[in-house]
Amino acid sequence: MQKFDQLIQEAQARIAASGSLVALDEVRVHYLGKKGVLTEQLKALGALPASERPAAGQQTNQAKHAVTAMLDARRRELEAQTLSAQLTAATVDVTLPGRGQEPGGLHPVTQILERVQALFASLGFGVEEGPEIEDEFHNFDALNFKPGHPARAEMDTFYLKDWPLLLRTHTSPVQVRALLKHGAPLRIIAPGRTFRHDYDVTHTPMFHQVEGLLVDKEVSMAHLRGVLTDFLQRFFERDDLRLRFRPSYFPFVEPGAEVDINCIFCDGAGCRVCKHSGWLEVLGCGLVHPNVLDACRVDPRRYSGWAFGVGIERLGMLRYGISDIRMNFENDLRFLRQFR
Amino acid sequence: MRISEQWLREFVDPPASTRDLAERLTSAGIEVTAISEGLPALDHVLVGEVRNVEPHPQADRLRVCTVFVGKGKSLQIVCGAANVNTGMRVAVILPGGHLPDGSEIHTTQLRGVKSQGMLCSARELGLGDDDAGLLALPAEAKVGHLLIRELGGADKVLEIEITPNRGDCLSALGVARELAALYGQKLRLPDCSPVKPGIKDRLTARIEALAACPVFAGRIIRGLRADAVTPMWLRERLRRAGLRSLHPVVDVTQYVMLELGQPLHAYDLKRLSGGIQVRMARSGESLKLLDGNKHTLEPDILVIADHKHVLGVAGIMGGSDSSVQPGTADIYLEAAFFSPDAISGRQRKLGLQTEAAYRFERGVDPTGQTRALERATRLLQEIAGGQAGPITKVAATPRVRARLRLRQAKLVQSLGMLIPGKAVSGILAGLGFMPSRHGHNWQVSAPAHRFDIEREEDLVEEVGRIFGYDKIPAIPYPAGQRMLPLPEERLPVSRLRDTLVARGYQEVITYSFVDAQLQVRLTGSPGIALANPISAEMNAMRQSLWPGLIQTLRYNLNRQQQRVRIFECGMRFIQQHTEIKQENVIAGLIFGLQDPLQWGLPQRNNDFADLRGDVEALLGAGGHTKRVDAVADTHPALHPSQAAKLMLGGMNIGWLGALHPAVARELDLNGPVFMFELSLEPLRQKRITEAAPITAFPALSRDLALVVEETIPAGRILDLTREAGHPLVSEVRIFDIYRGKGIDSGRKSVALSLILQDSSRTLTDEAADATMRKVVQRLQDELGATIRD
């Protein structure tokens, strides 16, 4: 009895002193290996008288179990220590910037166009496109611009040198093309580049517009106002945005209107951006002129429609505070990177 | 157009503030874009009378004046103006007062003589350009009064933008008419009653082109005083409208045009021979106009002529020979109605821009000629005396304007709101449409001064805009009944854009017109020219997006950017025989380090393969990677040994390569530039996937290293391997290319990794080896490859 207590105590000390799995294994072999102390003891049991054998066997087995348990515990401990050391050794600097390419970005005009398209898609407006080099018919005649009329001259049109063609001054010719192609009823938007002979802080010879067109039975200015209110409130994410309709003149609509929103910079109180008027001009619109429907082979007695045209750079100015329209096309990377 | 508020209020004076007037006008479509002060700030400026003028003891050019400023007070003021005279009424700034430019006036010593203030010229006061001498105030100006009071007191100037359909609003009368309708008030016209002729002289007028000139009226006025000057109040009205005072007669014609909208022209009577003719110009006829230039006329230009000469271009500008001069005593005053069609476009043709043509193009009231003549005669006689002859007027039969119908139902349907019938009648009457109501409909006639009323829709707008567009409610329009089509076989462009953005490209938008010379360099031809380019750098339509991208690169390199990765989507314009092909393309450019400067990757400049990787990513968006071949070829913009065209089923869909070093040098680019341009439509085409089952059998992989001549393209090796390895070889990749030790010069080692797969059974090593032997054989036979162990 005493002999085993002593043995277990001794084993406990040796196990605790083992600093590595290798050393621990040596201890295991010492007690439990083929020629280990306890193994020898078990082998020696057969030599004992039968009467002593059960008690001695029980004691030996108990000692063996105790040593095994201690060995296991110590091994788990050592394994945990090893793993922990390995983990520590593999420390990375998580604050170090990642490897590889940095993403680029989209031009603000594209970002606005995509936003406008998504908003109108949710009302069922598909996207139509048209050529940028246009003819007089689609850019002017079919849109009720009379030849020689000042409205036509005021468009500051670019003409081609050796062709009877021009650069479209607005996206409105897409109205004509779409109506001739699809007929009524129709609802579309037409985004794209437009060109006018003008260059200063607020004008570039190229800019972008989105044209909207809805032709159906019994369409009114009130519907136009409804859709534009919805659009501008969603675009600027301001449900309190108010619209002002002012009469204006575009040959292809009658009645025609310009739409202002209450200034988003000063909430209508008056500031530099709105020239202290409290209002910001954002787009032009109106009911499609019967002459345009006629030119597009749509019967103006059966159908009516509305159309609007909005300047994308103008929206960019208001949404992102781009004060000089020319920056859009200088493509200074320091400017463009702000829109990532 | 700029117009004085005081002037407007002489016609109609509603109890409303300036701001209110402006808002009502704007809400009715007469947009007031700005309101400014009619007069500069002229505090401490009084009317003074020069009582005495003495020479300055120390300076020849200066005079010492005694100026009476009322209430028994006189000031001693030193003055350098040549026109200072005893008895003259002048503008005096007292010490402590300010000039409009902000400078303060003090009592000072000028060359040893005390000066208690300053006598001012018109320019110094901000009242005009004239700085030749002191502003001479009229004799009736009250000495001691504030100058502002003598100038009619505070006034505002409205800046108004008139749309091209509203020529009738290009005058004080026109804007006042709108105000009268908006505020429901009566219009007061200035005195335009007939002047009793004092002489019988008249000039006959003959109109040869009645359609172009339906009304021509005029009268002779004789005996104008040579010393007449334009009174202060009239000059002020002109100044506030942005016009300069030139000559009393011219000033009056300008004034009446601004007031009533009717352009007038005055001729020096003694320069005319015989009667007036209104006719089309004869081919080759020429004439010196008031702008000082000689203009050659064409037969589509309407002219005013006498029996000998062309006198002027009708409705646009008078000739200089027949114009009034200083001292002209006898004039012929013309007021005509030229039809817009006869005027429009002509001033641009002549390179002119005049107030008269601006109004005639947009439509002048065809009934207003006599009224304007009478008004001008009255003003002229007030200012310069003289005797008027009778008015002679030649006119075509006036066009009878059709009555138009307006239906209440149409109003409701178009505007989406109900306007009470009484209000509709009131609005129509207020605008001078003389409505007669029949139940729910109206019959109206547009007044003569309106050129924009042709159909019912125009009437809807009239009623709507006066009633107030802002009362139109916002009614949601129902969303479309069907969802929008979403063709899966056509990729959205955004997928391509996003692909490049993820690979480090910044999108740019460059002008669609470029420098033709640069375009020749990059594409071999100048491209389609613009007739009226904005500048020489933007004179041709782009045939490629590369000119714009390269200029963008240069712009940014000049602004300290060293690494540039940019792309653009847009149209290019290429002449194809008798047509212009307008094609959407996507193009990109990379320059400088391949990766942003970082610790984890070696620094290296980008190269052809980097660009090719980006192009493959674009091709991959629609699943085209394997069906597109890059073929070495030459392009004017590209390095002859680093250029490839991309072929998709026999069609060239684009180019990629390095910018030609010679071009790069010309453009001061000190490093290689890699660029691609691809047609957008083929990239967007996408096949809808038909999914195949995934095989359960394992694949085998084999590597192969072969040595070939340097000139053998990798694409050829890959193609042959796939072909020879069919059907078991499912994938081939090049994983190493080696030149140098162990390889003969002029040759290269290419290492391939192959995946072999049999979809119907487990692939045996024997079968794989057999395929590999076929592959090797083929590469040896066709490419002279040797196998490396």
Image (cartoon, coloured by chain):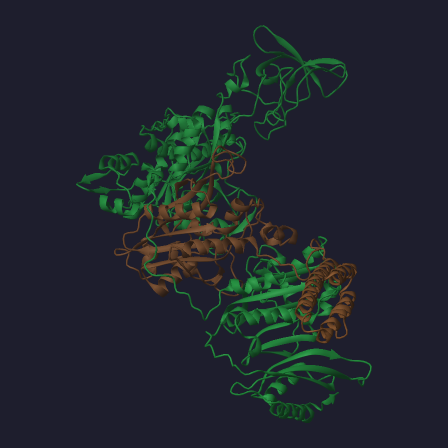
Chain colours: A brown, B green
Asked if residue B410 is positioned above or below residue A26 in the image, the reply reads: above
Q: On the picture, is B434 further left or further right than A202? A: left
Q: Quadrant of residue B122?
A: top right
Residue B140 position within the rendered picture, expressed as x and y whole percent measured from the top left: 50, 16
Residue B42 position within the rendered picture, expressed as x and y whole percent measured from the top left: 57, 21
Outermost right residue: B741
Residue A249 position within the rendered picture, expressed as x and y whole percent measured from the top left: 40, 46
* Residue at figure coordinates x 39%, y 65% from the top left: B485
Residue B431 position within the rendered picture, expressed as x and y whole percent measured from the top left: 30, 36
Task: Looking at the picture, tell me which residue is in the foreground, B367 or A100.
Answer: A100
Task: Looking at the picture, tell me which residue is in the foreground, B628 or A224.
Answer: B628
Asked if residue B611 is positioned above or below residue B151 in the image, the reply reads: below
Task: Looking at the picture, tell me which residue is in the foreground, B429 or B236.
Answer: B429
Q: Is residue B177 visible?
A: yes
Task: Looking at the picture, tell me which residue is in the foreground, B668 or B299.
Answer: B668
Q: On the picture, is A98 further left or further right than B185? A: right
Image quarter where the C terminus of chain B lies is: bottom right
Q: Quadrant of residue B548?
A: bottom right
* Residue at figure coordinates x 33%, y 57% from the top left: A293
Q: Is residue B268 visible?
A: no
Asked if residue B535 is positioned above or below residue B517 in the image, the reply reads: above
